[in-house]
Image (cartoon, rainbow, N blue to C red):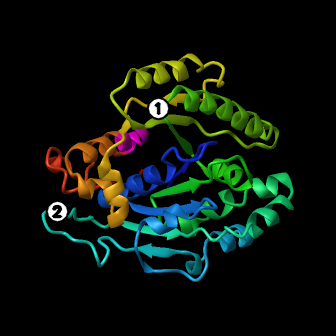
Amino acid sequence: MFTISVVSTKGGVGKTTLAANMGGLLRDIGLRVLLIDADIQPSLTRYFHLEHEAEHGLTQLIRSGVLSPDCISHCQLPPVAFEAKGVKLPQSPGGLLHLVKSDTRDGKLQDWMSGRMGLDMLMRLNMPLKHPSVTSAYDVVLIDTQGAIGHLQDAAVNAADQLLVPVSPDIVSAREFLDGTISLLDRHECAAHVGLKMPPMKAVLTRTEKTVDCKLISELIREHFIEMRGRVSMLETMVPAAVAYRKAATAQVPVHWIDPLKQSDVMHKLMWEFIPSVDGMCASNHPEFIDLNAPHDNV
């Protein structure tokens, strides 16, 4: 099982969009995907229609340290109200998409976590996700996080095998990304003496347009590679500011359903670059790569 946390110290950069669309695409290539909404703003919880909404969610998962069935909701694809006219729906060869919903807006979970000892707090997502009942049930776990440093973000970072970090395509946001990333590294590297390791971070430019700034920002982040301890690399794939992403969110489906050409290409390339073990695998409605579909055993 491979665990990805989508993190940023700045809100509004497209974390939920990345988590939802990558999760839906991984499901459509046949993988068993668990989404965890660890953001106090439950955007990921609301992205997909739920055919089964669990009684509990993130609060019980964190406090009990166990991912029990009553914390796992089931996403419905396609949703009942989806208008499929003119859309070639992909067939999911055995994939599934489950969700642990966010239920933390009242702040009680954050208050509870602030009272825990440091190591115990950091392991609150790591330990339940490492349980054999979870690793045998899912191929990929995707964790969406809050856009600010805090206990939930720290727990999500510690639970991840790899971090996906969206960056807005403007110089001010890029500088905030650099400062926030260095602060995040400082916070987590202090835990190295107890055996915890900071996972590698891969940055992706989101909501891009055809401007000179995008190239400058990529170069800026690469120039600070050493300053960021060599832990952050820049992905070549960029996610554009396309209306298809808004349409997909409104329809409660992944963007490769709405735009099986341009934005499907973008999300496939991002998935292949970020998770090389699925390189060449694609959703069944992807016209260029339809002959490349094949069973895949492990991620």
Of the numbered discs in the image, which one, if any, rests on residue 145? none
Q: Is residue 5 magenta?
A: no
Q: What residue is rendered at 29% in x and 71% in y?
A: 78
Toward which corner of the image does residue 94 lie, by quadrant?
bottom left
Q: What residue is rendered at 81% in x and 43% in y?
A: 194
SS assignment at label 2: loop
Spatial CA distance of label 2 from label 1 is 31 Å
Depth check: give the residue in front, 79 or 241.
241
Locate residue 210, reporting x and y percent.
Answer: 33, 28
Position above or below: 220 against 244: above
Q: Which residue is mark 2?
A: 87
Q: Which residue is mark 1?
A: 169
Locate residue 93, reporting x and y percent.
Answer: 26, 64
Locate residue 220, reporting x and y percent.
Answer: 53, 19
In the rendered structure, which segment of residues is drawn in magenta? 270-277
Toward which corner of the image does residue 177 lie, by quadrant?
top right
Toward which corner of the image does residue 113 lie, by quadrant?
bottom right
SS assignment at label 1: loop
Magenta stretch secondary structure, dominant: helix
